[in-house]
Amino acid sequence: MLLWLQLMLCGGPLAQVLSYQLELQESVTVQEGLCVHVPCKFSYPWLAFIGSHMFWFQKGADVDHDPPVATNIPSQKLHERTQGRFFLRGNPQAQDCSLDIIEVNMGDSGTYFFQIGKYSYLDNMLSLNVTALTHTPDILIPRTLESSHPRNLTCSVPWACEQGMAPIFSWTSAALTSPGPRTHLSSVLILSPRPQDHGTNLTCQVYFPAADVMVGRTIQLNVTYAPQNTAIRIFQGNRTVLETLQNTSSILILEGQALQLLCAADSNPPAELSWFRGSPALNATPIYRSPILDLPQVGTAEEGDFTCRAQNSLGSQHVSLHLSVACKSEPRTSGVLGAVGGAGSMALLFLCLCLIFRVKTRRKKAAQPVQSMDMSPDDSSDSGAHQDQSWMDFPEDHPAPAEASPISREEQELHYAFLQFPKLKPREQESINTEYSEIKTHK
């Protein structure tokens, strides 16, 4: 019997009944502005009368004169710093000494001890560590943001505590917005997205006035919209020739030149870009499925309309360009010029020869050689009837010779012609040259 009593007193249930004990988490860390619940259980000797008044004091306080930070006595004056934020809601009959702290601030860091009646549990104290608030709000977008379709966006702080002053929510966005319903820990924003809102920032900030701290979160809006501002850019080499946003645009290209057409459109999701000849029909097959259409050598076959179509799941848009091809004129070569010049020279020479021949013919008719006629006796009977006469026409400055003698063909008068052709110069394309020939005659 004595041995059993010793075991009970040394460490058994009886020892626990006869001593003061506290079950408490010795160190607790909480972020600024939040709330914390610290579980606590106490025990005391069963023969002791402790009463029902419970207190929490900060380490170093004089329990007889300094106010506690928390108590279960409603009329008890509390420490000014913890008034309305520290709560001792435990039941002494249940031996519950749990402590609730709301809207924790940096000044709450420190060590605290529990007291019931006149007994203070100084062997087990609570160490409270307050750190900066690192939590950020949650922004919830229920569905995809589509242009011209309003959506409700919710900003919430589920990690904050329900007690205390309500946090203040604020929204910042370039989009069209209007306020929606709110709760203690959330706020709703009605957003009417537009294509220009895609990629812009939306920010939700939450201010905790009791702790004087603010946190926020920023997201980028992902707004979907049909293709718009579809355009065709025309390149020749490394330079841009034309950019068209209208279906009436046209361009004139010299035959044989290279051309590059680049199609671009503003859309989300990105549009599929396709090229068509003429206007794209409902089930038309594109000639090319790429933003870039290369025309390495433009000819008359490429003349007409080229249409780019931009299409995504929300719609389509197309833009056309009319291409006109100017035919290239053939350059005149030196061989052609020589042939033309030679033909002209031959024609001129032929005309000169004809002129000389005509002059000589007229002179030969005017100056015939003297012919000798033998008058035979048989013809003398007819001489009286008529007599042939022979004559020659000499120039006045040359007297007639004493005796006329027959003139041979070799002694006929000679006429000379001197032809002088200026040297032909090759003429340039599209220019007209006049060719001259000089004719000089010498007797």
Image: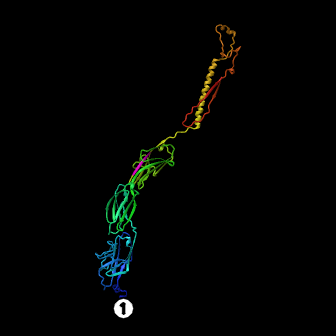
Give the residue at x 62% y 22%: 359
Where is 299 relative to 88, above or below? above
Colour mapping:
rainbow
Using the image as rendered, state which of residue 16 and residue 35 is in the foreground: 35
Residue 66 part of the magenta-drawn span: no
Tell me which corner region of the image, top left, top right, bottom left or bottom right, holds residue 25.
Answer: bottom left
Mark 1 — residue?
3
Give percent across and percent down for residue 150: 34, 57
Q: Is residue 181 visible?
A: yes
The residue positioned 32% from the left and 82% from the top of the image is 118
**Identity of the residue drawn at 30% across and 79% down:** 53
Give coordinates of residue 64: x percent, y percent: 33, 79
Nearest to the observer: residue 385 or residue 146: 146
Label 1 crowd (10 A; few <14 / some 14-19 / many >=20): few
Q: Residue at x 33, y 63 (%)?
A: 187
Q: Magenta region's main secondary structure?
A: strand
362 to the left or right of 259 = right
Give the total number of marks visible in the rendering.
1
Instruction: Spot the residue most to the front.
Output: 65
**What's drawn in magenta, residue-wise?**
316-321
Image-based side of 116 in relation to 341, left or right: left
